[in-house]
Amino acid sequence: MLFEEAIAFYLHWKKQRGKGVERDEYSLKRLVPHFAGKGLREIRRRDVRAYVDVRLSESAAPATVNRELKLPSAAVNIVRVELEVELPNPFEAVGLSEGEGRVRWISRQEATALVLAARGRWPHLSSFIELGLNTGCRRNELLALEWRRVDVDRGLLLFEARHTKSRRRRTVPLNDAARRALDRLRDWVGLHAPGSPWVFGRPGGGRLQTVQKGFKAACERAGVEDFRVHDLRHTCASWLVMAGVSLYVVRDLLGHSSITVTERYAHLAPEQVREAVQLILPLTQVLENT
């Protein structure tokens, strides 16, 4: 099986399960020139290392390269399981260090400007931004959300293990802003795509697959620089931590695999640390009492 055949098989497998492939398509633009036409059994670890060296020489971030290599790695693993064939996986666990990771967040004033800049004939983009800011959900968790998993009575979004990156069941509470965004989407879908099971439904029965171009244009109109779709999630977490919410609560809300991931936001709550150290009994007082 050729590299591109394995990728096509994997992307079809993902689409059948309602999973987004937008990020995969971006990765493919970089991967295809290096690996297209090669059989999976022909690709060696040194070939993958050569790809890494090229991408790093092009100033790609280690995290970006790791994400790109996750695509063929996942494709090989799915081909192994679904077609029951033995294959090596030279793309697996390359292990480029990503450092502490990116934390880019915006102020509430900037967020308001971004939402306003995103408004248009369809409510999808502005509502997506509001939901991202107010729930901390990942892009594909929102775009693939079905109405049956919106619990209006309890004010929750329901995610089964298959819907989340961490493969863990999660419930996400809705605040007033998130509820209003969902109400706008429900009204629009009911009028223009009646019967659609998707929160981000479109006429014809499909759903919104990507917000990338519209999001970038909205950021430019709002004057918000160096801000990506995933940074909506960072912003939600940052606002919570700065408001004094425990890192453990933020971890559970965002569905992080471990508290270590959430600790990237700890620096945003210096006052909590300052208050904590004040609880330490002064040494002079200890000595006076002995």
Image (spheres, rainbow, N blue to C red):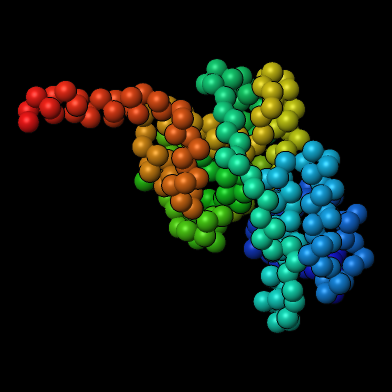
Name the foreground residue: 264 vs 176. Answer: 264
Q: Position of residue 153 (x, y in %)?
A: 38, 45
Q: Is residue 254 above or below residue 49?
A: above
Depth check, front residue: 20 or 106: 106
How many dots with numbers? 0
The answer to whether residue 87 is visible is: yes
Q: The C terminus is located in which quarter?
A: top left
- Figure quadrant of residue 62: top right
Q: In this orientation, does residue 22 appear?
A: no
**Relative image position of residue 289 (x, y in whole percent):** 7, 28
Q: Position of residue 222 (x, y in %)?
A: 68, 19
Residue 110 vs residue 34: left or right? left
8 left or right of 145? right
Residue for point 84% across, 61% down: 47
In percent of the image, x 29 and y 28: which residue is there? 277
The residue at the point 68 percent across, 45 percent down is 63
Q: Nearer the viewer, residue 118 or 122?
A: 118
Residue 58 percent coordinates (x, y):
84, 40
Quadrant into which the N terminus falls:
bottom right
Q: Residue at x 9, y 24 (%)?
A: 288
- 234 vs 51: above or below: above
256 lies above or below 5: above
Closer to the camera in the image, 97 or 35: 97
